[in-house]
Amino acid sequence: MMSIDEQIKIIAKGADEIISMDDLRGKLERAQKTGMPLIVKLGMDPTAPDIHLGHTVVLRKIKQFQDLGHRAVIIIGDFTGMIGDPTGKSKTRKQLTREEVIKNAETYEKQIFKILDKQMTEVKFNSEWLFKLNFADVIKLASKSTVARLLERDDFHNRFQEHESIGVHELFYPLMQGYDSIELKADVEIGGTDQRFNILMGRNLQKDYGQESQVAMFMPILEGTDGIEKMSKSLGNYIGIDEEPKDMYGKVMSIPDNLITRYFELITDIHPDELAMIKESLNSGNINPRDMKMRLAREITALYYGLDVAVLAEEHFKLVFQRRELPESIAEYEIPLSMIESDGIDAVKLLVSAGFVSSNSEARRLISQGAVKVNGNKISEFKIAGLCDGDVVQAGKLKFIKVRIKGQCADK
């Protein structure tokens, strides 16, 4: 049986803050003595259904709890999602319809089980209990906090100071998230550091309702591949868990060297002792950061696709980027006649229609950054002149197409 100290070492790896460590130790000791697993809660508002590695920071922490024998309860906020978490928002969020929330929730469920143990996970929708509250219940819940307390939140405080509107319904969001903890009798709630107010509200409400307060665990916000901004699909610095293996591997290889240990710490399951050795190797200069980054990329890719596929992704990376060779197999893309103009082809339309990017703005950004090449040569204009049948178009480091053009060249 693993010692409590060893369990805490694993659980605390990468955590920004745990409130409180004494409470966590006490709950772990009780669980070990009684054989009753802890209930570990994670709330998810299904407003953006595509999960990337930034989202997996908290999911991997829950998986570590599961590996120690504890149960996860994932709360899909179909009720709270119709309000929208006001955290970090300067204005009232657009309320989603129930249909939109349910559709996004279904996508979430499919993705989280790439990480969590399905047999040790329960997925619940908080409408199950929040829809049943009558107005007297809501008044009782509201009486457990004050307007002054709610306005301590940075987002509410800033909006109040800037005379921006704050909907009364928004003030109920942290109360409802806290009520989820009461309903579950949660032992631990995990969230990002941006969820501090909401999670501590649950801890306080449990005490008000005569329950033992949950442990609040806050995980850092993961930086994206640019090494500066938090990982975000809208910023284009994300690595999705549904990415093709070679794309996932290649994107990890693009992160700055100073993020290697942070990624190992937050989005892999390596043991804390091994993490310490990695940090020592990098700090002492005993290993080339590129080699350690390749290990990181292989480790992350293997988590989602298995080691065999990760090794193939690594071989692809070596072939294309270390040896400067083109991939053995490049998808072909036939240029529609409607895209061919007298002075060439609109590069933005080409990138979008070929599936390289999802928006015109993302395509323009890649071109402006010099990340788009034709036959290995960077393009700087939004129009490609002289594109011919068989030419290879590359976007970023990972995506290639061989164009097919009737008439041999687009401007002839």
Image (cartoon, helix red, strand yellow):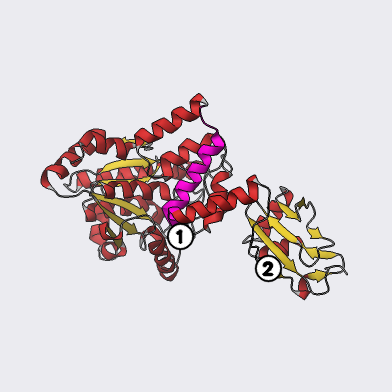
Amino acid type, callout 1: Thr
Q: Is residue 350 visible?
A: yes
Q: Is residue 244 left or right of residue 325?
A: left
Q: Which residue is mark 2?
A: 332
> Which secondary structure lies at badge 1?
loop
Is residue 246 positioned above or below 107 on the image? above
Give the residue at the far left of this rendering. 34
> Which secondary structure lies at badge 2?
strand
Bounds of the magenta span? 286-307
Please state the horizontal and vertical placement of residue 209, each as a whole percent of the image: 19, 49
Nearest to viewer (mark 2 / mark 1): 2
Q: Is residue 304 magenta?
A: yes
Give the residue at the far top of this rendering. 284
- Identified at 29% across, 65% down, the residue is 131
Q: Is residue 267 left or right of residue 375?
A: left
Q: Is residue 318 magenta?
A: no
Please state the horizontal and vertical placement of residue 314, each as a whole percent of the image: 54, 50
Badge 1 local density, few (<14 within 10 Å), some, or many (20+)?
Answer: many
Q: Which residue is mark 1?
A: 47
